[in-house]
Image (cartoon, rainbow, N blue to C red):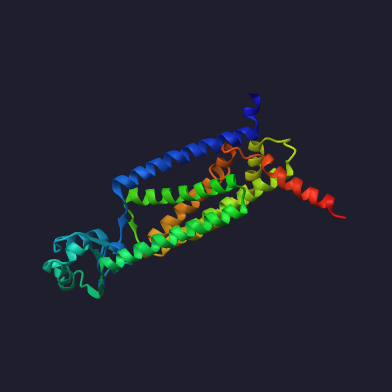
Amino acid sequence: MLNTFLKGEKGTRLRFMGMLLSAILVLLSVFTLTQKGLNFGLDFTGGYLTEFTTSQSVELKELQSFIAKNHNGEFELTAQGNSHFQLREAPSASATANSLDWQSAVTQNDDINAQVLSSAYIGSQVGDELFDQGCLAMFAAMIAVMIYLAVRFEWRLAVGSVVALVHDLILVLGLFSLLQIEFNLTVLASLLAIIGYSLNDSIIVGDRVRELLRVQSNNVLSPATIINNAIKSTLTRTLITSGTTLATVASVWLLAGAPLQGFAIALFTGIVVGTFSSICIAATLPELLGLSAKNYEVKVDVHTQTLLDMP
């Protein structure tokens, strides 16, 4: 029992606690998705999208309150700048005859003096097609990832990487469902980027685990210790890579404006949970499935025998 207080064993306990935390978060995310669903944007639901500017800076809450008095349906107002706004209306609200009253109100008000730049309608059929194509692209990416992992890794490491990838996507979707952040095409594109980033983290750790297992084919060290050593040797690289990427995404989040906020939030969350899952899931789950140096003994013995048989 004293070995549990060693540094390696502490690392093992932390990994298992992290995996337990991940399982709880996944269950909570699935529950939130089933209860609240996703807040799909106009890219998927259809409706009117109107952009307008004001002659002077206006507070978003004040403008929203003013428009609500002259609007008979549901709408979403976002600020693109100090005097640039974007208003989204659901199809049901856009179909009513009085839905354009708010435009007359903001353009005729002397304090607001708005000017409509553009007004476009996105049909629900187009939104359904975009959603189907986006889901098909994500499905194709997942299949390609699974094929790649099956060829590159022993099946236990491959399963760990796939589970970590699914974990990352579910947590990001759960966050969007919990906060009811608009889910649009840019967010869907960020999910595809998360697939690539999460896979990269898992492959880095998995490669190092595989290398150390091959070196320790004499079973001197336990699989838990080997995995801990692999994580320690890649942790600095992982943190530096994730840190610089997070700094870039945070800049987009804070400075790029509302149109890219959903994209930045999804990517920021995906990078954080992807780094976490590469340690607590991609490296820990194979250990639970029985990964050990014995899984690589056959490969080493065959290679050695081939060299011995050569004239």
Quick check: 268 left or right of 178?
A: right
**Residue 91 locus on image (x, y percent):** 21, 64
Quadrant for residue 124, please give it: bottom left
Q: Could you tell me which residue is drawn at 30 percent across and 61 percent down?
A: 41
Q: Position of residue 171 (x, y in %)?
A: 42, 48
Q: Nearer the viewer, residue 242 or 217?
A: 217
Quarter occupied by the N terminus: top right
User: Which quadrant holds residue 100?
Assistant: bottom left
260 sits left or right of 231 in the view? left
Residue 258 position, x and y percent, is 35, 63
How far across and how far down the image is residue 146, in percent? 53, 54
Can the viewer see residue 243 in this picture? no
Q: Is residue 231 above or below residue 75?
A: above
Q: Toward which corner of the image does residue 103 lie, by quadrant?
A: bottom left
Residue 310 shows up from this direction? yes
* Relative to 48, residue 158 above or below: above
